[in-house]
Image (cartoon, helix red, strand yellow):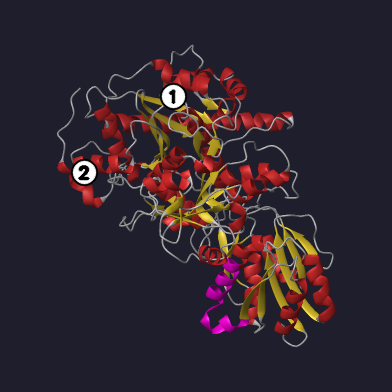
Amino acid sequence: MTVAPVHPDMALWRQQVVKWYPDLYQRTHFLPPVHFHRTQHEELQLAWGHPVLVTGPPLSDRPPGGASLLSQSDVRDDQSLQRVLDCLRQLAESPGEVMFVLSELKFGEYLNKPCFAAAGSALPNIPMDKKTRRKQEGDFDVLVIHRQHGILVGEIKAIGYTLSLLPQQQQDQAVNLKKKVEQAIRQLKKAKDVLQHVVSDLQPPPRVQTTLMLPNIARAQLHGVLAGNLPLSQALCQCVGVAVHADPASLCLTSDDVITPGQWWQQRVTGAGTDPAMTDHVYLDLVSRFGGPATTVTVYCSSQPRLARAHRPDVRTAGEGVEETASRFTPVDIVLHPKQVDVLNNQGELVFLTGPPGTGKSLILLCKGLFWVRQQKPVQVVSGWSESLAATHMLHSQLCRTAGPAASHLIHMHHFDLDTDLDAAVETLVKSAQGEQLYVIADEIDKNLTDLCTELQRRITDLHVWSASMHSEGVPPQLTEVILTEPLRTPPSITRYVQRMGEGGGVLGYTNTASPLPCDGPPLLSVLHSGQGHSAGGDLSDCLQCGREVGQILHMLRIGETGRSSSSPQPPRYKDVFILTDEATLHDTERDVSGQETRAASGMVQGVRETGVPVTVLEPRDAVGVRDVATMAGPDHVVAAYSLDVQGLERKVVVFVQTVRSQSGSFDKKRGMLSAISRTTAQLVWVKPGTD
């Protein structure tokens, strides 16, 4: 193996890649770490004067001059790429499958950073177009650099196939599929030529293979098109590198392989055997070229007033992917679905919002409160029991911050225990009324709301109450129930688990949104309470080794890291992380009056702290602590708590420590699990019993 002389900057590329991906040789990495979908928003000025962004559905056809508008073809392309990436993530879980997967890398972004031009000029680059005198146009839909098997380039076609059509329509579909295959063959040939050129300085060069990816087409349908067209079949054979009488469809990824890709992977990639050119040095070299600092990495992002094709550069590491995901599901701007705008504009004054977590119920309460404040109405933000205190603090803080200092005198918070203090709560709220008018917002208030509304209606002529809960049972008869089931603030990677946990407990399921969500979210990360070093007991919250492994994951996500490049999203802070249990088992170190330790902190807390991650434990019944956590006050520490004590709050990263051994059983046993998992806006880390 001969390697071209190393320019000093190229050595820096490699150092940076090893810093970004310290476990490069041990596990698979994706770049970008999360696939961000194209979305579309439109700015509206609603009645309270605060602008909001409203999600919009894709257009069936993009009009002339509408290049920035989202179309249904954009959505199909994003969904198809997501299916392929999910398939590759599944393969990456197999032992020995170490690879670096790039998606949507444009030719023009390869080694295009001006600050690295000198080093880039020493390497073969993308060939120039003779007419435009620029790099050839094109992209790699999927580019897999495999630690052992060389390079695989995939071309994705999002075409779908509907069998329940008339014969003529089925024939038209077959013609369309033929055109897509022909187009893919041309694109794959071009991509392979480009790849072989840019790695030609490596001798012997790494193996370059190609594949057609049809995640929405069954292999039988592809066979049907190829069977009636010998030239097309032969062209595909040549493209994927098999004899003309072989079956080229077996080397193409189809819908048959998306769930169980092992056989396709073996035939297309691993069946060729190990590539002797793929040494550790060459693997690092290839990753440094295609995924290093000299190559731009862009992702789709939203921009006002409408969004489709703006890009944000350099989302490279898992931590940056987490931060970017959270910023899209919980942005600084208020983002609503059209139905939520309709609720705000057309519902009456006595409303009960219900639906699964992450559907924007608290956001609507915030918007309604802003509307009342805009009308100079005093707003009472009410907590009715301990499990609504955190959400109430957060809502009160958001309302004050958004309305501004000049309106803070109109916003008042109250915490009651309606089980024991119903009469006192009624008297306090009646005294807070403005004449015969009373404006109340209550979030996560499941208990005794009916009794409170009954008493207030008896005393107040003009009563306005907007309340919300994830539970659809026990809606007060005085309030109009409004059901919200479209996810807004939680990625699908989380809602899939929330849906499972909420079954049988009066929590409604999710429904599909008319507009695409920003992304599917980072994949679940797991810690198994099993093996050497783990405690023998069943209490995972007291396992020192589980805590150490959680701390290592937080370091892998670069939580709390500062001083990053301004061109990349900053990783989450420590206070953007929850460690939550489904039972009140976490505790901090306890000391007597002389300072002597009387009880050590929970093993989970100790283990995380051992890795250098600061942790604050929210003790039960700590009202001041709940307020500080809800308002993001206090030091930059990870917060460890019982999930129901922070009900209604959100964090970018949630570590869920499962102390209930089984996910089955009564809903009461799953309440804590549901509450913990649903707090996540980006990354879920699940600490599980080793037997689950």
Q: In the rendering, at what x and y percent does residue 141 appear? A: 44, 37
Left or right: 235 in relation to 620: left
Question: Which secondary structure type mostly characterizes the magenta part of the structure?
Answer: helix
The stretch in magenta equals 393-410
Q: Nearer the viewer, residue 544 or 529?
A: 544
Q: Nearer the viewer, residue 100 or 107?
A: 100
Q: Amino acid at mark 2?
A: Leu
What is the C-alpha distance between the residues marked 2 and 1? 31 Å
| Residue ID at (78%, 62%) | 481
Q: Is residue 664 visible?
A: yes
Which residue in the structure is indicated by mark 1? Answer: 95
Q: Amino acid at mark 1?
A: Pro
Label placed on residue 12:
2
Name above or below for residue 53 compared with residue 511: below
Left or right: 98 in relation to 493: left
Q: Is residue 361 visible?
A: no
Name above or below for residue 419 compared with residue 83: below
